Every structure is written in C-alpha cells, then in structure tokens.
Image (cartoon, rainbow, N blue to C red):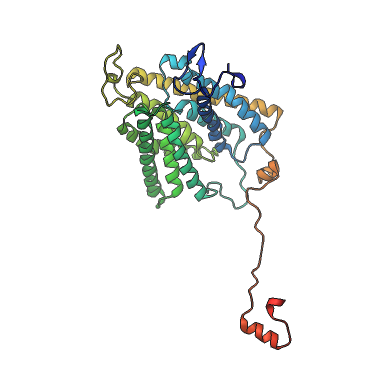
Amino acid sequence: TFFALQNVNANEPLMRDGEVVLEGIPGLLFMAYQGMFAVITPALMTGAFADRFRFKPYLIFVTLWLIVVYAPWCHWIWGGGFLAEWGVYDFAGGIVVHITAGFSALASLAVVGKRVAQEGEDLSVPHNVPFVALGTALLWFGWFGFNGGSALASGGTAVAAAVNSEIAASVALFLWLMIDWFKGGRPTLVGLCVGAIAGLATVTPAAGFIQPWGAFIIGIVASASCYMLCELVKRAGLDDALDVWGVHGMGGFIGTILLGVLADGSECAPGDGLEYPGYCVSPNTVTRSGEQLGKQVVAAVFCAAYSFVVTVVLLKGINLFVPIVPDVNASSNLDLAEHGQLAYSPAKGYTIEQKPSQEAAADKAGAGGPPSELV
C-alpha cells in the first residue's frame, strides 16, 4: 500500500483510503515506531535457538516469518483487522509481539533440537552475568518506550502504561528473586533479571488499560507462572537458551487473558456522550467482562497455534532447500564457521620484564657493563 514509503511523509499524518490514521502524528514517525516492533519481535525469537542456525537460512526464515506471521497479526490486532473489529485488545504487543515470538520459538526448538555441549561445558550456566544485567537494564529502559509510547500521545494513558510497567516488573523481579533464594539457597542476579522481563512481558498487553493494583497482580502471576513454565521446558528436554517461550510467549499469553479480568469497569465506557469517572485509564475502550475475557482467550489461543504451526511449516520448507542446522564441527564455534570471526580474540600470553633496581644497575656498570637503561 505504501511501497517504498510513498505517501508516508514527515510533516503530514498517515492517510489510508482518504482518511487520517492518526491525527497529529507524522506518517514517517508512525512508520519508524511500528518498525521498531517489527524488528524486535524476531530478535526475541532468535534467542531461543542460539548456536543452532546457519546464517543464510536464518535470513530467509526471518524475512518470511515477518511476512506470514508478524504482519498478519499486526494488521488483525492493530491495523483494524477482523480481530480488532471483533473487540480484541492488545495495548503494546502481548499478542502481536510476545505470543508470536514465543510460540514460534517453541516451534523452532522442535525443529533444530538442542545445542551441542563441548567437553566439560554446562549450557545452563550464563555466558556472561554482567552482560545479562546490562541487557536487562537496556530492555527495561526501552520498555517504557514500547508500553508508554503505545498510547501514541503524551497523556494519562501513557503515564498509566509506564507506571504499570514499572510496578509489574518490580513485583515479578522481587518474587522471582525470592523463589530462587528459597529453591537454591541463595538469590541470583540472573533470576532477578529474568523475573523483571517476565513482569514486563506479561503486563505489556494490558499496560494502558488497567489500574496500578492490576499491574501488581500481574507481577505476582507473572513470576509464579513463568517460573514454573521455564522449569517445565527444561524438564521436557527442550533447549530454550533464553527462556523465550516461558517468559515472552506465555507471559504475553497470560497477560492477554488477564486483560479481560483486570481492565477498568463498564463505567469507563458509558457511551452516548456520557461522562466517565476521572480514574479511568483508557476511557471508552476495553472494559472487564466475561465476554471480553472470552475474546481475549480465543485470540491468545489462535495466535499461539497459528504461530507454532506456520513456523514449523516455514522451517521444514526452508530445510528442504537450505540446511538450517550447522554440522557438529561448525556448531562448536559457529561465529568462526559462519562469519570467520570470534566473539572474543584469543588471549595472548605475555611476560612482564621488570626494570632493574638502581643498585643492580650500579653494580652492572661497575663491573664494566653498560647501565640497564642502555641495554
């Protein structure tokens, strides 16, 4: 429709069928913001199958996946598609981003299998704990842009979405830390980080539709449920390197369903020009009800099944023409095999030559030899 960004301008809102899509937001800005979601979604999925994909089939897969999985769900939910018309809500990507990525990640694990551990290597040990903490900090900061920015305006809904994101993440972080401490006898930084992401992923579909107390509940549910689901994946023998399904996939799934329970009441959508109470987060949008809960459940289940099945078909089809999984020798160092580079340069041995003391230099000079500084 907008091939090569035709009619997507920096000074005018986006137009579709002669109507303004979003008043007051330049079309080019809206495109860039939506492009951010499209870019991050396959990146989430990629973490699950680390070290098991050759680069060429990966590029083919991600390109096709964006077209046949991400784009349809983005349109059906956010672009006025049939699910949006039916009344399904997803504030910032619980369905569009997290369920699609999470269940596609689960499907990919069924196709590519497990990583090959080297002798003495424990794949459950994090590669670099400070990097985990740094990545979590960057994600958490960026999530305010995802969730708060999804209000598409600087107002009360954006404020609520940002605060709710902070509450859910903080609660889930703390409880995950406590679970780790209780089960393992000590708190862990990695557990803290995973808990925070679980809270953020779970609150995402509901962030701009619920009260802060609802975000607190989501944080509790996210930590308990996502922790158990991550353990379930391990016991099932699936090698999800970054817990993508348990944290993102099921976090988005659970949050999508909880939206039907935790959204504001019917008084926040009075209709017919009637006034709504001042505490309403996103007036005249979604409200909690049994009917809304049913719609959210159907959409979540449909998205999970669709993403899983289409991903399996894509991977099986690609593998017929281009082998996806590297051979055993290449998988031991995939960076070197695929790109000719190492993540870390090999350590070079070196020695430190100590400068002789003044007494030793004087003795050497007295014996007829030159001072050490001249050697």
Q: Quadrant of the C terminus?
A: bottom right
Residue 76, image x, y percentages: 49, 18
- 333 up-or-down from 42: above or below: below
At horizontal 56% and vertical 30% (from top left) the residue drawn is 107
> Which residue is drawn at the image coordinates 69% and 81% (left, top)?
371
**Side (left or right) of 27 relative to 89:** right
The image quadrant that residue 115 belongs to is top right
Whether residue 360 is situated above or below residue 195 in the rendered picture: below
Considering only vertical position in the picture, is 306 above or below 338?
above
- Say which of 145 and 241 sits in front: 145
Q: Is residue 293 visible?
A: yes
Hey, which quadrant is residue 299 in on the image? Answer: top left
Residue appearing at x 69%, y 84% in the figure = 364
- In this orientation, does residue 224 appear? no
Residue 316, given in percent of the width and then of the height, sits at: 64, 27
Q: Residue furthest bottom?
A: 366
In this rendering, position of residue 6 left or right of residue 198: right
Which residue is farthest right?
A: 368
- Residue 278: x %, y % from top left: 27, 25
| Image label count | 0
User: Would residue 237 appear left or right of 147 to someone viewing this image?
Assistant: right
Tell me residue 201's x, y (percent).
44, 34
Pick whichever, 56 or 38, lies toward us. Answer: 38
Front one among 209 and 357: 357
Q: Quadrant of the N terminus?
A: top right
Identify the residue at the far front of this view: 11
Q: Is residue 255 left or right of residue 128?
A: left
Image point (31%, 33%), residue name: 212
